[in-house]
Image: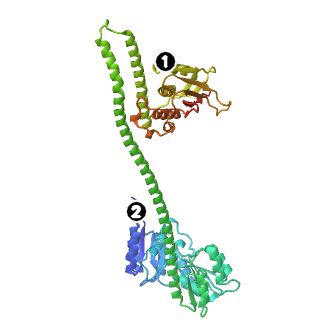
Amino acid sequence: MTQPPCILVIDDDQSMLRLIRAHLGAAGYQVETASDGEEGLRLAESLRPRIIILDLLLPGIDGFVVCRRVRENPNLKGTAILMVTAVYLSEEDQIHGFRMGADDYLVKPDVILSKPVHLKELRAAVESLLSSERGAPTGLPAPEQARDKVLIVDDDEKNIRLLKMRFASEGFEVCTASSGQEGLEQLEAFSPDVMLMDLKMPTMSGLDVLKIMREKGQDIPVVIMTAYGSESIAVDAFKMGADDYLVKPFDTAQAVRQVAQLVERHRLKKSQEQLTARLKRISCDLVNRVNHLEVQNQKLEKAYNAVRGLSEFNRRFISSLSQDLRAPLSTILSFLSLMRDTSAKGRDFQREREAQEIVFKTAFRLEINLANLLYLSRIQAGALSVAPGAIALEPVLENVLSLARRSLGRQDIRVTWYPDQSGRMVEGDEVLMRDILVNLLDDAIQRIEGAGEIVLEVLPPEGEGSGSKPVLRLRDTGSRHPDEDLVPVTVSEIAPESAREGFEGIRLNLCRHLAEAMGWRLVLSNRPTGGGEALLEMVPHEL
């Protein structure tokens, strides 16, 4: 198992030692502590730590001496040193420290030690030192991304130096500009967290700079510095987007606190805006999810109702089927019983022949009704199967007409068929086509009272284009269709109780649905001269 990096903390502040030990220890580091320079050197010799976090001001020997002895010790050649101090370091102090070998330094705040931002800053510096080999000192505070950046724009060089020294001692990364134009350039290059800007400057005033910034949408906190007596101008600055102002001369310590608070407020504002935007996105996502769930719920309700309806349909289907079977079967059983119980000498073969015709036609119509009921149940369940293929039109029509004359026809009804000599082929399901034609013929026969005629013919396609389709036309001299029978209805509106001998509207609507399942179209109408007309538009077979 890999040993965690060892970090030695040398500081006479016991609360600071406990705080660093707890924070870095929780991050997985091995943390050892010493409260003075001598103890720290002894522990460094025995522990050989990867990093020494070294306070500058120690009792006995100070941090500079400890730093020098660590660098002179060949056993500690690979040990990095991170210096911390509670006092402001001048550039000479920094150079002094780095000449002794310090890898980095941090200004230790004395009033906000427990703030996570500072502990994170310390941890970031530790991780940075561990991730790279110790090189030549850069003189830059560590690490850049962990420090607040302030841009000071003022044409007064003394004021700039004073503010720079003060803000640097408080842990800020400082950039300066001596004019408004330079300030705009540094704004782009430096990307500060806050801007401290004088109101009155030559060429371009602070208000001019502020106006340009806000027009570009640069939402950086701006503190305006103004001389005594120009508070009214500061009010104008507020109207243009300034966040705060300072009246010269001012206490630099107060300025630092004011700026720090402004940066914190701005950071909280940005966090709040990001959180609000995130909440809006989450809310929109939740609304979309709720809408999606509502749609799914509606689909589930629809499916549930369909299942309930299908169950109810099946119940009614079985009830209707039993009633449809009872009467024809009773007729058939009565005829068979009569034949069984009548002796050969007493039988009237002519009457038996007539009775056989009646039984055959009754059984055939019973087959039609059973087939229609099965079609209805399959369509209701979404289980209707279609087997498309090429259909030779004339042989199928001849077969259907022969079956209709024998099984449905009456002697007083003439069925006329004008054959199609072109050998036309259509695309569809031959079984469905047969059942559609049988139903249309039976419907026409049922509406003819007395003598009448049924005429079938195939109308050639209009034109020779790919969209032209052959049409089978069936005309009869029967009574007119009731208007309600000509209105297309959905399958869910079809009641199984109606699917018995004699029903018309249900049968015709069923034929429409069977035709649509093959990509065909059935149009029903009443002829002006009397009788009905059916136009079955078919799909031509493409060779």
Q: Is residue 406 above or below residue 304?
A: above
Residue at image location 37% in from the left, 76% down from the top:
18
Residue 387 percent location from the top left of the image: 50, 28
Pick the front one: 181 or 163 = 181
Q: Is residue 464 above or below residue 231?
A: above
* Residue hosting label 1: 411
Element at label 2: loop
* Farthest-out residue, left: 341
The answer to which quarter of the image holds residue 341 is top left
Residue 158 percent location from the top left of the image: 62, 89
Q: How is the image coloured?
A: rainbow
Side (left or right) of 478 relative to 184: left
Label 2 packing within 10 angstroms: few (<14), some (14-19), many (20+): few
Label 1 packing within 10 angstroms: few (<14), some (14-19), many (20+): few
**Viewer-nearest of discs 1 and 2:** 1
Residue at image location 40% in from the left, 43% down from the top:
306
Pick the front one: 136 or 16 = 16
Quadrant where the C terminus is found in the figure: top right
Residue 466 in sight here: yes
Q: Amino acid at mark 2?
A: Gln
Q: Earlier in the sequence, mark 1 or mark 2?
A: 2
Q: Amino acid at mark 1?
A: Gln
* Residue hosting label 2: 3
* Farthest-out residue, right: 203
Instruction: Report the number of discs.
Output: 2
Quadrant where the N terminus is found in the figure: bottom left
